[in-house]
Image (cartoon, helix red, strand yellow):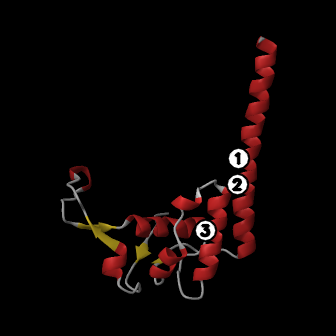
Amino acid sequence: MALHFNFTKIANKDSVCFIKATEDSPMDGIKKGDDIISPATNAMIWMTMFVGIGQLTEKTAPEFYARMVMSDKLNDIPAKQRLSWEDVQRHIGLSTNVTYETAAKWAKRCVLARLTDDAKRYTKLVQEKAEGAVNA
């Protein structure tokens, strides 16, 4: 399913969601000076899928931010690369076609994904170590 988004309810959407292209990008059909989606807005759009919250409102913003920080920690994203609380606040009004996940369902999805990834990684390390011992 495609990810659809809407900026129309974001206050100051023109200055929050868009920046001017600093150079031509012919492969993307972009010319220097064109309005393009800002990196923070692009990240916020995609983050709605990670956090399981498609409607960013005053009410959902704290949970959105808490889930975002937890997701970043689970995925080893350094703090300096994370979106800020201010980014979240500036994007209140953003909506996507992501369906709301309860906190329990979201936590289960995120933790199970991390556990599965870690188990595969550790299994591979054990196998490589065993193979190294056999070949020595």
- What's the distance in space between the residues labelled 3 and 2, CA to CA? 15 Å
Residue found 77% across the figure and 36% down from its top: 123
Percent x, y for residue 109?
71, 62
Label 1 vs 3, first from the N-terminus: 3
Task: Please give left or right for residue 77 compared with residue 3 in the image.
Answer: right
Nearer to us: label 3 or label 2: 3
Task: Please give left or right for residue 90 compared with residue 102 in the image.
Answer: left
Task: Please give left or right for residue 3 compared with residue 77 in the image.
Answer: left
Please name whichever residue, 86 or 67, is drawn nearer the observer in this view of the structure. Answer: 86
Percent x, y for residue 88?
51, 76
Residue found 78% across the figure and 11% down from its top: 136
From the image, tell me which residue sits under label 3: 68
Please name whichever residue, 51 or 1, is drawn nearer the observer in this view of the structure. Answer: 51
Percent x, y for residue 49?
56, 66
- What's the distance in space between the residues labelled 1 and 3, CA to CA? 19 Å
Q: Secondary structure at mark 1?
A: helix
Q: Are the residues flagged by discs 3 and 2 in contact, CB closer than 8 Å?
A: no
Q: Secondary structure at mark 3?
A: helix
Residue 117: mark = 1
Residue type at mark 1: give it. Asp
Residue type at mark 3: give it. Met
Residue found 57% across the figure and 81% down from its top: 61
From the image, tell me which residue sits under label 2: 113
